[in-house]
Image: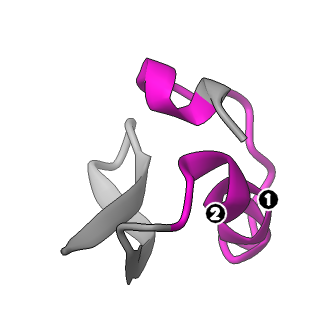
């Protein structure tokens, strides 16, 4: 099974970056590298509680 993570510009409604990874990786493991891929200043992150785990 796979997980899809999306970074979205809420003002422009554009997908900034996307990452597909194996389901056995935790969201906390994916988040740091995922944020670096955006090449933009991040003002806010919204997520579900699964990102709280490591």
Q: Picture coordinates of residue 7 (x, y %)?
A: 46, 56
Q: Residue at x 63, y 63 (%)?
A: 30
The answer to which quarter of the image holds residue 6 is bottom left
Residue found at the very far front of the displayed protein: 24
- Residue 44 vertical placement versus 38 (above, below): above
Q: Is residue 47 visible?
A: no
Residue found at the very far top of the displayed protein: 49
Q: Picture coordinates of residue 3 (x, y %)?
A: 30, 66
Q: Residues within 10 Å of mark 1 (few under 14, many from 20)?
A: few
- Mark number for residue 32? 1
Q: Is residue 51 visible?
A: yes
- Residue 41 vertical placement versus 29 (above, below): above
Residue named by callout 2: 30
Q: Is residue 31 left or right of residue 16?
A: right
Q: Are marks 1 and 2 in contact (CB under 8 Å)?
A: yes
At mark 2, the secondary structure is helix
Q: Residues within 10 Å of mark 2 (few under 14, many from 20)?
A: some
31 or 39, nearer to the observer? 31
Q: Picture coordinates of residue 14 (x, y %)?
A: 31, 60
- Residue 1 vertical placement versus 12 (above, below): below
CA–CA distance in space, label 1 to label 2: 6 Å
Quarter containing the C terminus: top right
Residue found at the very far left of the displayed protein: 1
Quarter containing the N terminus: bottom left
Q: Is residue 53 left or right of residue 12?
A: right
Q: Picture coordinates of residue 18 (x, y %)?
A: 41, 74
Q: Residue at x 39, y 79 (%)?
A: 22
Q: Which segment did they paint magenta?
A: 25-51
Q: Residue at x 38, y 37 (%)?
A: 10
- In reply to whether residue 36 is colored magenta, the answer given is yes
């Amino acid at each position: 099974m796979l997980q899809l993570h999306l970074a979205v510009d809420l003002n422009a409604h554009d997908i900034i970056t996307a990452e597909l990874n194996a389901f056995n990786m935790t969201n906390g493991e994916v988040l740091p590298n995922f944020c670096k891929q955006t090449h933009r200043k991040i003002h806010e992150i919204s997520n579900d509680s699964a990102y709280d785990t490591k």
